[in-house]
Amino acid sequence: MSGDSILDDGPDMAAAELALGLLEGEDRAHALRRMLAEHGFAQEVERWRGHLAAFFDLWPPIPAPAGVLARVERSIDGTVATPVGAAPGPRRLFWPVMAGLTSVAAAALLAVIVLRPIPVAGPTPQPSTVAPAAMLVASINPVAAGTPVTAVYDPHTATLRLTAAALAKADRSAELWVIAGDGVPHSLGLLRTSGSSSLAVNQGNRTRLAAGATLAVSLEPIGGSPTGLPTGPVVAKGALSRV
């Protein structure tokens, strides 16, 4: 068996790195775009988040001893500027070294979790009384021919992200609605005319965004419905489900 096939059979490390917070810049942006486009990848990220949350619950945070920060600041302030041509002094090296050690420690922790889970001795920790909120996804399918719009709702940030939607003409706005158990449409906002959309969900609509709720898109006058309810035809809809 070749080395490539071994790697192909392993876990998607990008999902684990995103859940652990190791990705930055373009790597993080690419992973977030994959969550919108790949349902399986979004599921894998959520699985890692749940696994890591349970893992870190076994080691509660321990505050640093009193006076540590003051000693670090005194050691930094007590150094002198590095002369031209001389080796970097402690002040120049301190923060880069600390940043490097932090990244190495996080990567090492991820490797330990993936390659060799640590056995836990002693009594079983009590489960958390608050279950982590699961991400929700929906495929909003056009009523007529067209490309479905993928929506991903992250309850941790109360953000709803949608792939590009070509549902409205130039003289109309595409407005997104959530229809929960009461059967009443509630506006979530307007979709962009080009590219992906990101909507901040207000407090009232957060409880309505749950598995089984319907997301629907209607065509409204420019700027949105003047009545607070859909006034134009519904051109796409889909149901939310847990990742």
Image (spheres, rainbow, N blue to C red):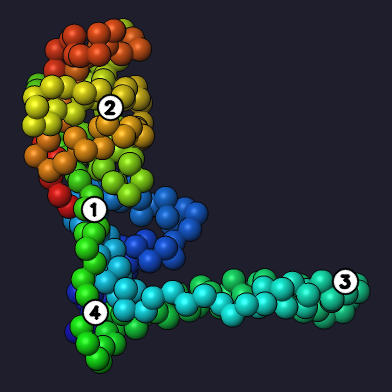
Q: Position of residue 54 (x, y in %)?
A: 27, 72
- The type of residue carrying mark 3 is Ala
Picture quarter containing residue 116?
Answer: bottom left
User: Are dots 4 and 1 in contact, CB under 8 Å?
Assistant: no
Q: In the structure shown, which secondary structural element does the residue marked by tag 2 occupy?
A: strand
Q: In the structure shown, which secondary structural element does the residue marked by tag 1 occupy?
A: loop
Mark 1 is surrounded, within 10 Å at the Cα level, by few (under 14), some (14 to 19) or many (20 or more) other residues, namely few
Q: Residue at x 28, y 50 (%)?
A: 35
Q: Is 31 on the left-hand or right-hand side of 25?
A: left
User: Are dots 3 and 2 in contact, CB under 8 Å?
Assistant: no
Q: In the structure shown, which secondary structural element does the residue marked by tag 4 occupy?
A: loop
Q: Nearer the viewer, mark 4 or mark 3?
A: 4
- The mark that comes first in sequence, 4 or 2, is 4
Residue annotated with mark 1: 133
Mark 4 is surrounded, within 10 Å at the Cα level, by few (under 14), some (14 to 19) or many (20 or more) other residues, namely few
Judge by depth and name the residue closer to the eye, 98 or 235.
98
Q: Position of residue 34 (x, y in %)?
A: 30, 51
- The type of residue carrying mark 4 is Pro
Picture quarter containing residue 185?
Answer: top left
Q: Position of residue 224 (x, y in %)?
A: 30, 13
Q: CA distance from mark 4 to mark 3?
A: 50 Å
Q: Is 136 on the left-hand or right-hand side of 67?
A: left
Q: Residue at x 29, y 63 (%)?
A: 49
Q: Nearer the viewer, mark 1 or mark 2?
A: 1
Residue annotated with mark 2: 188
Residue annotated with mark 4: 125
Residue annotated with mark 3: 81
Q: Nearer the viewer, mark 3 or mark 2?
A: 2
Q: Residue at x 26, y 42 (%)?
A: 153
